[in-house]
Amino acid sequence: MDSYMKEVQASFHLPETYSSPFNFAQHFGWITVGGVLFAVAILGLLIYYRQRFLEAASKAAAST
């Protein structure tokens, strides 16, 4: 992946810099971990409130 990104950066004919805008590979893992943790937190909330939701839905269905 790094060799491909260096090749792409070279094709733009930009001056060499210490921090390349294309060098996101080192941060990609943390972004992925953050996304997975966010999804797990949402699923956890849905599971935690499932019983309360089902009780409220059954009361609402019984009252109509």
Image: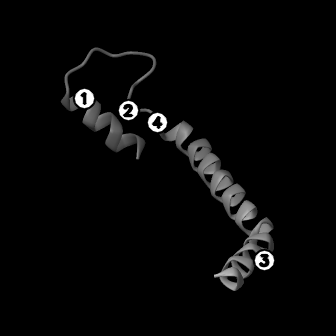
Q: Name the residue under label 3.
A: 55
Quadrant location of the C terminus in the rendered image: bottom right
Looking at the image, is 13 positioned above or below residue 1? above
Residue 21's x, y, as percent?
Answer: 39, 26
For label 1, count other residues whose C-alpha is less than 10 Å away and answer few (under 14), some (14-19) or many (20+): few
Mark 3 or mark 2, which is nearer to you?
A: 3
**Pointers 4 and 2 in contact (CB under 8 A)?**
yes
Secondary structure of the residue carrying tag 4 is loop
Q: Distance between the residues labelled 4 and 3?
A: 46 Å
For label 3, count other residues whose C-alpha is less than 10 Å away and answer few (under 14), some (14-19) or many (20+): few
Q: Earlier in the sequence, mark 3 or mark 2?
A: 2
Residue 25's x, y, as percent?
Answer: 49, 40
Residue 38's x, y, as percent?
Answer: 65, 51
Q: Name the residue under label 4.
A: 24
Secondary structure of the residue carrying tag 1 is helix
Q: Earlier in the sequence, mark 4 or mark 3?
A: 4
Looking at the image, is 64 positioned above or below residue 48? below
Q: Mark 2 points at which residue?
A: 22
Q: Earlier in the sequence, mark 4 or mark 1?
A: 1
Q: What residue type is labelled 3?
A: Glu
- Of 51 and 33, the residue lying toward us: 51
Q: Quadrant of residue 43?
A: bottom right
Looking at the image, is 25 positioned above or below residue 53? above
Mark 2 or mark 1, which is nearer to you?
A: 2
- Of 42 and 58, the residue lying toward us: 58
Q: Mark 1 points at which residue?
A: 10
Q: Which residue is drawn at 78% across and 77% down?
A: 55
Q: Which amino acid does label 1 sit on?
A: Ala
